[in-house]
Image (spheres, helix red, strand yellow):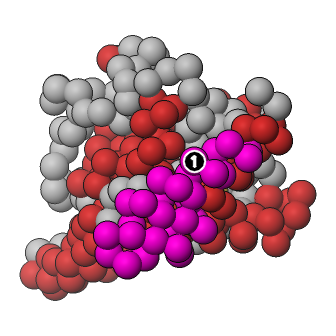
Amino acid sequence: MTPALEAATTAVAGGAAAGAAWSVVGLGWPAAIVGAANGAISGARGIYHWRSGTGPLAFVLDSTWTLPMTTAAIVAHGVAAAQGGRSGYVRSLSARANRHVYAKGLRIRTGFAVTVGNVVSGAGDVKGSPRRQKLVTDHEDVHIWQARWLGPLYPVLYVGWTVAGGAVGAVVWLTRRRAERFTRVVETCSYYLNPFEWWAYSRDERWPPPAKVAGLGWSRPAVRPFTQTSRRRPAPPGTPAAPR
């Protein structure tokens, strides 16, 4: 199938699926536009792995249950498009991988990648750094599937933990951790101890992260890293394994 034909096909299918799914809450037409846009972009770039079980599943979830995050992903594409060639679209980590990866694109914090829907931005120099490649495949990809499974609940739960965890971190610093920097304690509680990050860092074999305050929160990984379970992951990617 040519890129143009795949783009047209997935645009029509994505728009139809999104419109039908979200018409039950009166958002059929806006949803159809987003579903068609995601289908067109993703089809033209050939990201969905149609010959495996994960590709059709990812497409259906992106077009229906996860559509709010897919909408945010369209915004991430827009930021990358505004950068032109400087955004650094990484085809090698995107084609048939059920995701889009940009070396730059939308970036919130220097050195950190950010995943919004099915778009990974700020991946960095993935061609010259195996570590940055692993960040995408073993960490950020987990976030993509977390969002696919939880759909509209994902941003609520993630942001909710960030806010509540930050407040708890402030209290912890005031009462127990004044020897540590305030910002480091708050970051540990709001970001590193976020269950979604704990899961992703564990899969990436990076738990505990060096920047986490030692002795604060859980010390053991949430799940086995992909390097131990197998490089050929069970479908779909991101599915939790038994705790170690």
At label 1, counting other C-alpha atoms closer than 10 Å, the crowd grade (few under 14, some 14-19, many 20 or more) is: many
Q: Name, please, the residue furthest toward the right.
A: 85
| Picture coordinates of residue 165, whole percent (x, y) | 22, 73
| Picture coordinates of residue 227, whole percent (x, y) | 41, 20
Give the magenta part as a residue range: 7-35
Residue 79 left/right relative to 166: right
Q: Is residue 200 above or below residue 113?
A: above
Residue 166 visible here? no
Magenta stretch contains residue 162: no
Residue at point 39%, 70% (across, down): 23
Q: Is residue 156 above or below residue 235?
A: below
Residue 95 left/right relative to 226: right
Determine the secondary structure under disc 1. helix
Callout 1, which amino acid? Ala
Question: Would you identify the image quadrant in which residue 200 lies?
Answer: top left
Q: Nearer the viewer, residue 187 or 15?
A: 15
Q: Is residue 199 above or below residue 177?
A: above
Residue at point 32%, 70% (across, down): 24
Question: Would you identify the image quadrant in which residue 206 lies?
Answer: top left
Residue at point 43%, 76% (across, down): 27
Q: Which residue is mark 1?
A: 13
Residue 56 left/right relative to 130: left
Residue at point 82%, 31% (across, down): 2
Residue 55 visible here? yes
Q: Nearer the viewer, residue 56 or 228?
A: 56
Report the magenta stretch's main SS.
helix
